[in-house]
Image (cartoon, rainbow, N blue to C red):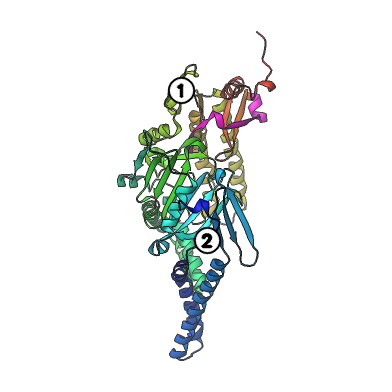
Amino acid sequence: MGGAESQDDWRRLAGRSLWASAVKSLPIAAGVVFGVGRFAMGDGRPTGVVVAVCAAAAMLVVAAVLAYDVARLRTTRWRLTPERLELRSGITVRQHRSIPLDRVRSVNLRADPVSRVFGLTVVKVGTGEHAAEGTELALDPLARHEAESLRRTLLRQDERPAPGDGPLVELRWSWIRYAPLSVWSITGAAVVLGALYKALGWFGAKRFAAEAATGLWGWVTARPLVAVPLILAANLAVGVLGATLLFAESWGRYRLEREPGRLRLHRGLLTTRSLTLEERRLRGVEISEPLLLRLGGGARVKTIATGLGKADEHETDDAAALTPPLPRALAWDLATKIADTGRPEAGATGPGTGAAGMGAGALVPHPVAARRKRIVRALVTVAVLAACAGLGSWLLPWEWSRTAVWAIPAVALPFGIWAAVESAGNLGHALGRRHLVTRQGAVVRSTIALDRRGVSGWTITESYFQRRNGLLTVSAATAAGKGHYDVVDVDRGDGLELAARAVPGLLEPFLVREKK
C-alpha cells in the first residue's frame, strides 16, 4: 500500500466477499426452509415434493443474497490519492464520498468469524466531527493484509518508536470476575427471552410461544411465593452466564498499546476489532464506575476524543471504551498515563494537580446545599409515589395488588435517600496543569479529566432551585466525546472562578467582579 498514494486507479472491494455472504445467508435460508417446510407438510404433500420445495427455497435465498452482493461489488470502487480517500458506491442511488487525509482521526478494523475464515476485514475511517452521517467511510470488506496496510498509510505510521511506546495493558482472565457486576446479570434473561420469542415468530411458532407465556403467567399467579423466587434465581443465573460469555467474546485477546503518536486497541475472541486513535486528537479520559462494579472494586476507562464513530448495532460496548472492567487501581494508573495528568504544575490550583486531581480525596467538594437539594427532591418524589399508591389501592380490583402497590414508595424512600446522599458525596472538581477534572453520579460514578485546550466555550445554567441555594452548573463545550461535560451544583462563585481559570480569557468578558 506504500505506493497507493501515487496511483489514481479505482480499486474493487475483496471478491472473496461472495463466499462470506453465501455462508452468512445460510441462517436466513434455514429459517425460510423451516417455514416453507412447515407450510408444505401441513397440506399433506409427498415428502419428495416437500424436500424439493425446501431446497428450491434455500437456493433462492442464497442466490438473492449473492446477486445483491455481486451488484454491490460491481458498483463499489475506492481509491487512495495523495490528498483523499474516495469511495463510489450505490446500486440504485450512486454516491461519491471522500475524506481528506489530513482529517483522518481514527481507523477501525473489524472481522467477524466468517470474515476471518476468508481473510476479510471491514475498514471504517473516522473524521474529527461527531458521529453524524457522512463522517465515517466504510470499506466492506478488504483483504486482511490490504486493510492493515491501508491503516498504516492513513495514519502515516512511518515514525520511529518513541520512549514509552509499547503495550500499556493486556487482558488478564482474572478480570472476568467483574463481568457479572453489570446490568446484563439482571436483564440478560429478559433479553434472551425476547430474542427467543422473536425467533419463534420468524419460524412460524408464535402460537407456541404465546401458549408457553400464558402457561407461565398462570403458574406465577397461582403460586407466587414459589414461582417468583425461582424465576428471579433463573434470571440471575442466565444473566451471569450471559455476561461472562459476553465479556469473553468482546474482550478476549484484549491489548492496548501505544504506537508512535497514537493508541491502538485490539480485542475480540470470535469477532476481532482493532481501533487506532491519534493521541493528538485525545481530549481527555473518563473513569466510569457503575454501582455493582464499584462495589466489586472495579472500574472502566473511556476516551474522550474526536473522530470516534458510533458503535455498531450489534455492539454492546461504547465505542469510546478503552478497557474492559478491571481493578480500580489499574484503571486510575492507566487513565493517568493516557491523560498525562501526572506531571506537576507551577501554580496549579492546589490538590487538583496531575493524577492526584483524579483521586477521590483530591477533589474540591461541593456545598452542603447540593446534598440538601437532592434530599428534598427525593422526598418530594416519594410523596408523589405514595399519593399514586393510595389512589391505586382504592382503584385496583385485586386484594393482593392493593397491598403490593405500596411497595413502590416503600422501596423508593430508602433508595432515594441513598441516591441523594451518594450523589452529593460524589460531587467534586479540580483544576490541574492541563485538565479540568469533574466527578458526579450515584448509580454510575463518572470522573472526567478534560483537556483544557479542548474547551471551546462555556454554558452557565441556574435552575430555580439552584438559584435559591446559591448553586449553578458549569458546562464545558468541546468537539470531542459527547460535546459537553458538566460541573454540577457547584457554588456560584467557585464555578465561575473555575471556568475563568480553566481557559483564561474565554469567560472573562462576561464576568462582573465585585470590588473589594
Q: Quick one: quadrant of the C terminus?
A: top right
Q: Is residue 317 visible?
A: no
Earlier residue among tags 2 and 1 = 2
Please indicate whether residue 187 sits to the left or right of residue 390 in the image.
Answer: left
Circle 1 crowding by C-alpha within 10 Å: few under 14, some 14–19, many from 20: many
State the residue position of label 1: 353
Label 2, label 1: how many angstroms apart (C-alpha)? 51 Å
The magenta-colored residue range is 443-468
Q: Give the total of numbered labels.
A: 2
Compared with 96, 502 (above or below) is above
Residue 266: percent from the left, percent from the top? 39, 48
Q: What label does residue 11 carry, if any?
A: 2
Between 239 and 501, the one lying in front of the other is 501
Q: Is residue 462 magenta?
A: yes
Q: Amino acid at mark 2?
A: Arg
Q: Is residue 120 magenta?
A: no
State the SS at label 1: loop
Circle 2 crowding by C-alpha within 10 Å: few under 14, some 14–19, many from 20: few
Residue 192: percent from the left, percent from the top? 45, 60
Please indicate whether residue 129 sits to the left or right of residue 15 in the image.
Answer: right
Compared with 227, 285 (above or below) is above
Q: What label does residue 159 carry, if any?
A: none
Q: Amino acid at mark 1?
A: Thr
Q: Which numbered mark, 2 or 1, is in the foreground of this view?
A: 2
Question: Residue at image x 44%, y 28%?
Answer: 341
